[in-house]
């Protein structure tokens, strides 16, 4: 292998540990997302994901170290986002009610001044699409996959 890709946001919490035991690059999902945010001129972004991704530093610090201020939902909204991920999206359940709840949370993030919102869980893109809102959405699943593929093409 030329590099490692961890195809989930939350599991990047162990990326440092993995990197200590491998001798090839790990393509970090937050690093690639930071590049996309910078290309788009985003300096303040909302982050949706599991509560671990939203609340712990393993993801946010990468963005903040690149000059991107990260805003997460309030505590009740964090729990709601997390519950919908684990109790619905991971089980293949897509509901209009949950979609509206996410859109309401995105609306609150917009009111706090964010310029874009990171869909920082591989399943969120199943529920919320760019057509659902005017605020730019950054789907980390797509960002990660496209960049990994481009790196593979560049190596050939």
Image (cartoon, helix red, strand yellow):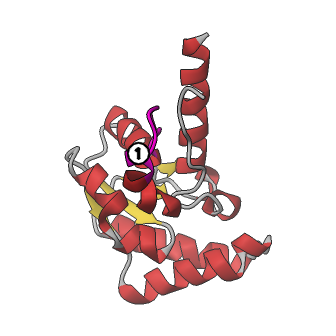
Q: Splitting the image into 4 quarters, where does residue 69 fall?
A: bottom left
**Residue nearer the viewer, 90 or 21:** 21
Q: Position of residue 145 (x, y in %)?
A: 61, 38
Q: In the displayed structure, does residue 25 sit left or right of residue 42?
A: right
The vertical placement of 144 against 11, above or below, is: above
Q: Residue at x 56, y 42 (%)?
A: 5
- Which of the image's four quarters has the C terminus? top right
Q: In the displayed structure, does residue 12 sit left or right of residue 100?
A: left
Q: Splitting the image into 4 quarters, where does residue 82 fall?
A: bottom right
Q: Residue at x 31, y 60 (%)?
A: 60
Q: Residue at x 72, y 78 (%)?
A: 88
Q: In the displayed structure, does residue 69 sit left or right of residue 117?
A: left
| Secondary structure predominantly adopted by residues drawn in magenta | loop
Over which residues does the magenta segment extend? 18-28
Q: Position of residue 7 (x, y in %)?
A: 60, 50
Q: Position of residue 91 (x, y in %)?
A: 78, 74
Residue 22: say if magenta: yes
The vertical placement of 155 against 30, above or below, is: above
């Amino acid at each position: 292998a030329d590099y490692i890709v961890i195809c989930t946001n939350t599991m990047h919490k162990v990326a440092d540990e993995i990197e200590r035991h491998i001798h090839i690059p790990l393509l970090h999902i937050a690093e690639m997302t930071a590049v996309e945010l910078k290309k788009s001129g985003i300096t303040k972004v909302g982050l949706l994901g599991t509560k671990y991704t939203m609340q712990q530093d393993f993801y946010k610090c990468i963005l903040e170290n690149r000059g991107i201020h990260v805003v997460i939902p309030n505590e009740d909204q964090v729990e709601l986002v997390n519950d919908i991920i684990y109790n619905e999206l991971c089980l293949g359940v897509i509901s209009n009610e949950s979609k509206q709840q996410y859109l309401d949370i995105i609306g609150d993030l917009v009111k706090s001044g964010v310029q874009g919102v990171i869909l920082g869980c591989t399943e969120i893109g199943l529920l919320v699409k760019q057509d659902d809102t005017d605020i730019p959405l950054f789907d980390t699943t797509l960002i990660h996959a496209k960049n990994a593929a481009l790196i593979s093409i560049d190596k050939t």
